[in-house]
Image (tube, rainbow, N blue to C red):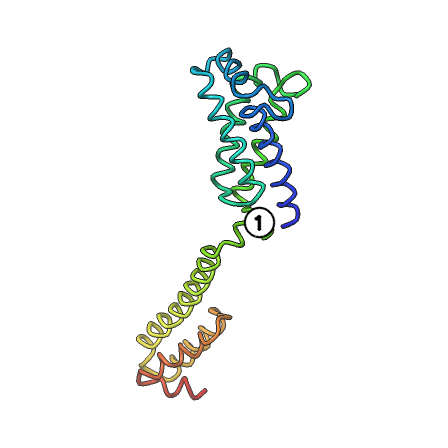
Amino acid sequence: MDIGLLLLRLTVGLTLAAHGAQKLFGWFGGPGLDGTGQFFEMIGFLPGRRHALMAGLAEIGGGLFLALGLLTPLASALLFSVMFVAAVTVHIKKGFFAQNGGYEYTLVLGVAAWSVAFTGPGLLSASCCCPWRSRRARSTKASAEAGICNRWVVMGKRCLAGCERTTNEVDQAKSHLRETHRCDTTNCWNTYLQCCSKHTVGSKLAGQ
């Protein structure tokens, strides 16, 4: 899956970055900022040069960030917004297919860029090399494990609070917890037993 996301990011990101370079610098046979500004004025975006600058920056910046896999939610949002505006203002009145000037091409590029915001950039991306991402992942894992262990402690306390009347009730509660609340986190069951040992029936549970 990571290789597929890499290919998707490189293809869509670099394609849209090339379109941005056409608008800003006139590369790859593009009209440049002045020519793009005149076109924008013709379709109702005034001042045309300013809108052309914003569109070009969104395409080249968002495209490069998407290709690198860095700040992908922001990059995806920028690219999708540019493609959406292009589809609605220029192409939608010409139908669907690109051969007639329709919105087919902008739809594919926009949705492809937007999809990465939901899937994430994958492991083969610049964001996976960022130190703050590693710390966040470790913190999230530790918090999840602590939450699971805390749940066991709470269950143990609730169980013992209502099961101190008879030995049979204690045995039934212990069996029920083992059957219905399995936890693979290390030391969860030991934490539960430590909680039990603080109560009057804890020694019986710990010894079985």
Q: In which quadrant of the rendered view does residue 83 lie?
A: top right
Q: Is residue 95 above or below residue 1?
A: above
**Disc 1 target residue:** 125
Q: Which residue is drawn at 56% across and 21% down?
A: 32
- State left or right for residue 2 relative to residue 168: right
Q: Position of residue 63 (x, y in %)?
A: 56, 36
Residue occupying image coordinates x 37% and y 70%? 155
Q: Mark 1 packing: few (<14 Cα in 10 Å), some, or many (20+)?
A: many
The picture places residue 18, in percent across and down from the top left corner, at: 60, 30
SS state under label 1: loop
Q: Please name whichever residue, 134 or 145, is drawn nearer the observer in this view of the structure.
A: 134
- Residue drawn 55% across and 49% down? 126
Q: Residue 193 at x, y = what percent?
A: 40, 80
Which residue type carries mark 1? Ser
**Front in this rendered view, residue 32 or 192:** 32
Residue 166 quadrant: bottom left
Above or below for 23 versus 190: above
